[in-house]
Amino acid sequence: MGKKSVKIANLDVDKLIEMLNAALSEEWLAYYQYWIGARVMEGPMRSEVEPELLVHADEELGHAVLLVDRIIQLGGTPVLTPEDWTKLAGCKYATPDDYYIEAILDQNLDGERCAIERYQQIAAYTEGKDYSTYQMAVGILNDELEHEEDIESWLTDIERLKEDIRKFRM
């Protein structure tokens, strides 16, 4: 435990660790949702989108590493079992029952928007009180905003592709 980390954090550290463990649980679920979705996805633009979803998955895993490190620095214990991920996560895992690319992307978009809210909450809670966690939260938030933009762009491209196909058929 980093005693100075806890001492300089001018807030309820236990509450912060709870928030970070919830975010950690969500990152693990997001990692798997991206990873498995990329593997089972079908439809137009799959070959372009799949490698990008795997990059997003790797970035979510990187977020998990940051969260674990910060939880330990604050003297906490990171969530230890996958069974607890679904209990602690506010952003829920969406099973990819429909393999069509738009359904997979819609599920990931919902997850990203939830993650954006999570990191806004952590940033707001730590701003001016715990600079290390605040900087980490803002960095992850920026990644999540970028992921949201990527997914929205792919969905727009797919919709335009479908419109072009409809025009061609007429």
Image (tube, rainbow, N blue to C red):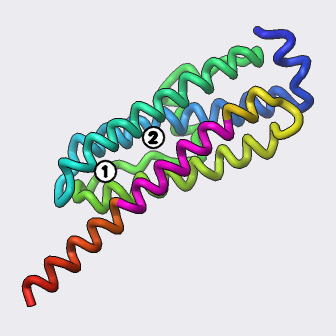
> What residue type is disc 2 on?
Ala
Q: Which residues are magenta?
A: 137-153
Residue 139: image location, x then y, percent = 63, 37
| Label 1 secondary element | loop
Image quadrant containing the C terminus: bottom left
Q: How many marks?
A: 2
Quadrant for residue 69, please give it: top right
**On residue 152, which mark appears?**
none
Give the residue at x 29% y 72%. 159
Q: CA distance from mark 2 to mark 1?
A: 12 Å
| Magenta span contains residue 55 | no
> What residue type is disc 1 on?
Pro
Badge 2, how many Cα within 10 Å: few under 14, some, many 20+? Answer: many
Residue wearing tag 1: 96
Quadrant for residue 40, please give it: top left
Badge 1, how many Cα within 10 Å: few under 14, some, many 20+? Answer: some
Q: Are marks 2 and 1 in contact (CB under 8 Å)?
A: no
Residue 25: image location, x then y, percent = 55, 34
Give the residue at x 73% y 41%. 122
Question: Does residue 10 sit above or below 34 in this rendering?
Answer: above
Question: Does residue 156 sit above or below 114 in this rendering?
Answer: below
Image quadrant containing the N terminus: top right
Give the residue at x 85% y 10%. 3
Q: Main secondary structure of the magenta part?
A: helix
Q: Which of 161/4 is in front? A: 161
Quadrant for residue 103, please give it: bottom left
Question: Does residue 130 sit above or below 157 in this rendering?
Answer: above
| Label 2 secondary element | helix
| Magenta span contains residue 152 | yes
Residue 30 relative to residue 80: left or right: left
**On residue 30, which mark appears?**
2
